[in-house]
Structures are given as structure tokens and as C-alpha cells.
Amino acid sequence: MWLHRTGLEASTAWGSHWRGFAGGHLVGAYGGQRAGYIALGAHAGADVRLALKWSAAAEGFVWAGGGGSAPDGDGGLWGARGALRYQQPRIRWEVGAVYTNGITGTLGGWRPSVGFYKSLDLALAGAQNSSHRWAPLPLNVGLYGQQAFVRRPAGDLDGNRVHPVRLVGAEAYFPGARLHRFLRIAAAADTFGGYMHVLHGWGVPLLQPNSKWELTVQGILGAGGGGAVLGADGGLHAGWGLSGAYRIPTVGTFFAAFSDVYTNGPMAYRSAQVGVRLPVVYAHRVSPNARNAPSFTAQLLNPTPAPVHLGVGAKLYASKERWALCPGGELRLLNHHKISFWGSTWWAGAGGNLGAYAEGLLDVRLRLFPWAQLTFSGGVGAGGGINPGSAALVAGGGVELGPNGALRFHRWIHTPTPFSLSWVVPLRIPLVRIGH
């Protein structure tokens, strides 16, 4: 199968020639016998500089996932990767080789790889004391619902029926003067429970940048699969879209979009989306020679850090009939004193007939006491031992114990299944935010 990997990576220098790096990523198969396979992964490694622009890197990684005709059961994989890298000022190219080994032995082997990276130097707490030039990096974090109408899915031999599918998703949206970029992740919550996709997109704005109204023509490229979508229909997703939005300053952007997407199988779908994007603007360093880059002095940076909260942990589903151990994590960009919203995702890496199960949750935190904060969660889960074409509603709550972590309980609703117990360890990255 042919795989793509999309993720975020942080690095730090170890002396003059070595760098260490670590990050998280999503993997999707866009072609081959297992087209439609999707996994959540984490990686860590190091690279050493060989020459002015050349370096060599090695890393280890773990995955948890399923779909693409992969059998139910253990969804975990592990592997290693080596690469030769060519570094330009903000862009890095690489070629290498990857080895993977699945717990069940159904996926694995050697394959070549090529990669492209774009780097950003984000301002950390204390950046206002530096002499670098800084520019705003606008980011909108979006949540949306999507109504899709699928044509010719697997099993529909005549291709005359239209299958309605509801999806829920999240996106990271980077607006620009001439080109908007976004990354969307969505999963089916009903008919095609277990199906999900990861889509990259580019939008060309048709209205003035300073207008409260936004109209963009979009190109879409990514991968998807799972659930009732068989391997023949999973894999490469490509299409176009049209999006309109209205921006309310200091509040957010409300948007609606239409998209027409085709796969490398017989399946295709048209969909409508409605959602909201919440703005976050961070600072990133720009080159002293950069032209036409909006910049400001370090003294104009908000000296109060706006930390990005990352959480990593494990969740255990257990009952007499089923069990699964799910690694996962959460990302919080919008943190407030009394109430916060964020998203989390958990993927089965091992376990009975729940292996290859995955879920996505929307979490809310309420700060009611100085020593503890209550959390409430809701979302959908599918895959593994859940029949393709159906999804489980997940709900629960827990308590956060400050820097020591968070303890949460969840269970499925209206679906015979066990409850889960999870422990999340918080990590904080003290980025500097522009404004208040």
C-alpha cells in the first residue's frame, strides 16, 4: 500500500551538529491492497549535520489504527525510519527507507519514502526580550458538522442509490492574503460509522482580505477509509469546494461550504458543511531579509504566554467480552481561566475484538475549585469490534488534578460495550500570543 503521513514535529539543538525531534502524526493509505487504512502515530529521533545543508536522520515510531480491509484485532504497529535530508531556510526535503512491523503480522515490511517539511520558529515565553523580527501567524481552530451524499459505495453494484452520511470534524485553518491553507479530519457518525478522512486543502480568496465576508474556491487532497467503505473505495480523495464565511471580530468566523470529492475507487460524494472557527494568533520569527512580511518589534509581543496544552495518555476499555488499550492525546489551543474547550482522540493499539477501534471526543473543562477542575466529554467511536456501518456514542467525565494529570471515565451509549478508564499527562508549550 502507498501511505502518506501528516503531522507536527518539534526539535531542539544538541550542540552544533545534533538535533533531537519528536512529534505526532496521522497516516493514511491512498493506494494499494489496503487503501483506506488510517492510523494515529508518534515518533522521536535525532539527526546529525553532515554538511552545510545536508543531514542524516533516524527515528522510531508507533502506530495504532485500522480500516482498509485490515482485520479486527490488534491495531498496533511499530517501526523505524532513516533518511537523508536537504535543508533550505524554511523548507526541508528528504528521501529514505522505512520498516514497519504489525503486531498481528498482517502489515509490515520495507518501503522507500520521500518527505517535505515546512518549518516555523514560534515565539516562546521570553521572546519579547530577544532582538529578532516577529510576524503574526494567524490560526483558526474550527469545528463543523457535515452532511454528505455518497454515490456508488462498495456493495452498491448498480450505482443508482444515494447514501446519506453525517460526519463531524475539526480543522486547522491558516488564512493568508493570497492563499488559505487548511487541514481537516472528520469521521462518520451514522451510516458509515468507522469511516474517516484526513484532507489537505488550499483556498483562493475572491474577496478583499479586510472584508468581514469571505468567499473561497478550494482544492482538496487527502485519504480516507474504514467502516462500511471497503478497501476498493478507500484511499486517495481529491476534489474541489466552495466556502463562504462571515467573520465577527473577537468572536470567530461562521462558515458554510460545499465540496465534491472523488476517490480512486468507484465511490464519490458531495457534501455540505456548517461550522465555526475560533481565532488564535501566535508570533513566529521571520528572516531579517524578508520583504513585505508584516513584522513588529519584540517589545510589542504580549509578554503573557498563551500555552498550548498537549496531553498524552492511555485509555483502557474492559468488560467480560471486549477489551482494548488505546493510546491517544489531546490538543488545547483555547485555554481560559474558568472554562476551556478542546478535542481529543484515542486509537486502539492492542486488544481483543476492539483492536483497530478509534474515537474522537469534544471535551469541556470547568474550573470550580482551586484544587480540581471537572471535565465533560462527548463524541463518537467506531471500528474494531463495532459492526461496519454503525458508530458508538461516547460520553463521560472526570477530574483534572493540576500538573499531575487527569483521570476520566467514559462509556458507550445505546451500544452494548464496556466502560473505559483513562489517564492523561499534561504537557505545556509556552507560546506567545499576539493581543489578548
Image (tube, rainbow, N blue to C red):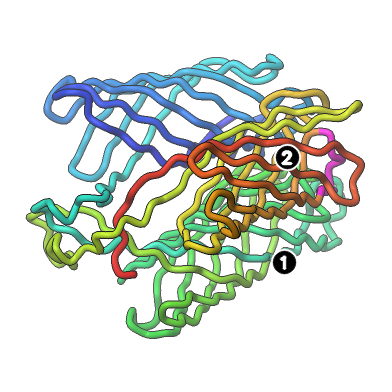
| Disc 2/disc 1 C-alpha distance (Å) | 23 Å
On the image, numbered disc 1 is attached to which residue?
A: 147
Q: Quadrant of the C terminus?
A: bottom left
Residue in the picture at 34% in, 30% down? 21
The 10 Å Cα crowd at callout 2, few under 14, some 14 to 19, many 20 or more, is many
Q: How far across and how far down the image is residue 180, in percent?
A: 39, 65
Q: What residue type is labelled 1?
A: Gln
Height in image: 320 above or below 131? above
Amino acid carrying label 2: it is Ala
At 41% from the left edge and 26% from the top edge, which residue is drawn? Answer: 44
Q: Which sits earlier in the primary sequence, circle 2 or circle 1? A: 1
Residue behind mark 2: 232
Task: Please say whether residue 65 is visible from this viewpoint.
Answer: no
Range of residues picked out in magenta: 385-392
Q: In which quarter of the image is residue 139?
A: bottom left
Query: Looking at the magenta stretch, what is its main secondary structure?
Result: loop
Choose between 361 and 188: the one closer to the eye.
361
